[in-house]
Amino acid sequence: MSQENSSQADAMMKLGGWLGRHQAFGLIATRCSAADAECLKAIRDGGEYKQLGLTWDQFCTQHAGISRVSADRQIHCLEEFGANYFQFVEVMQISPATFRLIAGAVTGEGLECNGERIPLVRENREKLASAVAAMRPKPETTAGAAAKIGLFRRRLEELLDEAHGIANRPDRRPALIGVLEEGGQSLHQLALALREKTLVLR
């Protein structure tokens, strides 16, 4: 057997091994596990599927039984969050965006919330859901938003007062003009962008 054929055979054996493990994990779990995601990552990164003349997209649908988008999403979650994400979703459904908000509080032993560690088991599903809801950023009230606008206005007025003070120094005026022109353009562009968004929402 030539070296090229031997290399191709080794690649096919390696691919078959990873694919077999992926299919086995798929039968064990109703959702993708960390081990399943690791198999998909190894297959994608190894590139042995190319020996079959297939693209990653084709391999996923024809041999792995999963779309390329789903496979890439699972691999990305593995790379970003590790096994904790998959352990969590085996207990309750959670989006990557929501998990990102609580990832720092999740360990292999559970979810830390208000000094309590909640084990990641199905019996704690409702408790975990309540903890996740409590850890989400709270929507800002109208009063809170108005207070922030008022604070921003006061800061802007203070900056303008400070600019007037600097303007009394002739040697600093050229630099101040540059800062004000640049800042004015940025503020104008922000105002235009916000106006466009407001019109779209109407």
Image (cartoon, rainbow, N blue to C red):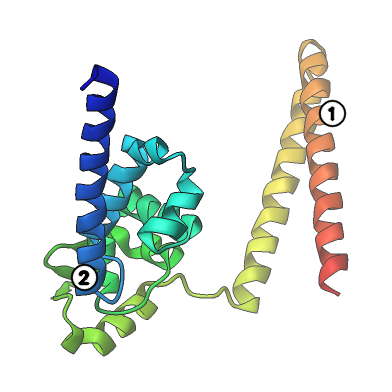
Q: Position of residue 24 (x, y in %)?
A: 20, 65
Q: Amino acid at mark 1?
A: Glu
In the picture of the structure, the residue carrying the numbered disc 1 is: 181
Nearer to me, 72 or 105: 72
Q: Is residue 61 above or below residue 187?
A: below
Crowding at mark 2 (Cα within 10 Å: few <14, some 14-19, many 20+): many
Against 165, is 191 above or below? Answer: below
Residue 148 position in % (x across, y down)? 63, 63
Q: Secondary structure at mark 1?
A: helix
The CA span between labels 2 and 1 is: 50 Å
Q: Residue drawn at (43%, 51%), measured in percent from left and top?
A: 59
In the rendered image, which quarter contains the C terminus? bottom right
Q: Nearer the viewer, residue 185 or 100?
A: 100
User: As drawn, is 196 to the left or to the right of 60?
Assistant: right
What amino acid is labelled 2 in the image? Leu
Disc 2 element:
strand
Give the labeled residue for mark 2: 111
Question: Residue placed at 19% from the left, 73% from the top?
Answer: 28
First in residue order: circle 2 vs circle 1:
2
Query: Which residue is situated farthest in the top direction here?
Result: 171
The quarter holding residue 33 reads bottom left
Q: Position of residue 96 (x, y in %)?
A: 41, 63
Q: Identify the residue at image location x=19%, y=85%.
A: 122
Query: Is residue 73 shown to the viewer in this render?
Result: no
Q: Nearer the viewer, residue 83 or 155?
A: 83
Displayed quadrant of residue 52: top left
Residue contact between numbered discs 2 and 1, judged by CB atoms under 8 Å: no
Residue 179 in picture, x, y percent from top left: 76, 26
Which of labels 2 and 1 is toward the front? 2
